[in-house]
Image: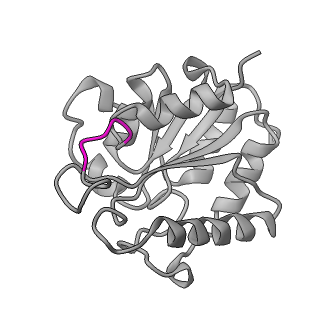
Amino acid sequence: MSSKAIFIDRDGTLNEDVGYISDPKEFRLFDFAPEALRLINNSGFLVIVLTNQSGIARGFLTEEILGRLHDKMESELASQGARIDRIYFCPHHPEIGEPPYKVDCDCRKPKSGLILQAATEMDVNLKKSYVIGDRYRDMETGQAVGATGVLVLTGFGREEALTPPANRLQQPEHVAENLVEAVRWILNRENLDKSR
């Protein structure tokens, strides 16, 4: 039986977006992130992070440093009783860097490569899943494969919300103040809100 997932963007959604992070010490989770992930963990949905990390193509960090950064993130979350089931990242940029990172790939959001890879590897039913992010491109990534998009107003979300989406695929189903509010909306919609 296929699983359901909540796909979450990283920078600006789970953590503060402070530009290209090249040192794990610079990484700061939003205070509400552990609570949001605990709610998902207790709901039966998988937590899958989808993140563009073109800082690798741009030479600001390596895949090894990104791995250490993700280890720190997962450790901080685990210490607060929350977990991420899998992290998928795109290290590419279509115009900047050197091969193999300078490439017009199919995994850089809003393209669907990462979410389709995750769905295949983790047996996820995309039509019963959600995408949460702070950019219209996150909405497009999800909706192109039948998932429901929720825009958060953290990170670039407030700025994005000021301008109507360029196309129908970028239109979020819901706009939430932050990740925990987005998760509560999803769980309420799915009749899984245990806080009622």
Choose between 53 and 32: the one closer to the eye: 53
Which x, y percent locates residue 32? Answer: 64, 63
Query: Residue 33's quadrant in the figure?
Result: bottom right
Q: Residue at x 21, y 45 (%)?
A: 163
Query: Residue 143's quadrant in the figure?
Result: top left
Does the magenta run of residues contain 105? Answer: yes
Q: Is residue 59 visible?
A: yes
Chain part drawn in magenta: 103-107
**Quick check: 104 above or below 80?**
above
Residue 14 left/right relative to 153: right
Choose between 195 and 179: the one closer to the eye: 179
Q: Residue at x 31, y 72 (%)?
A: 59
Name the image quarter holding the C terminus.
top right
Q: Is residue 30 visible?
A: no
Q: Residue at x 58, y 65 (%)?
A: 67
Residue 127 left/right relative to 101: right
Which x, y percent locates residue 172? Answer: 39, 33
**Quick check: 38 above or below 167?**
below
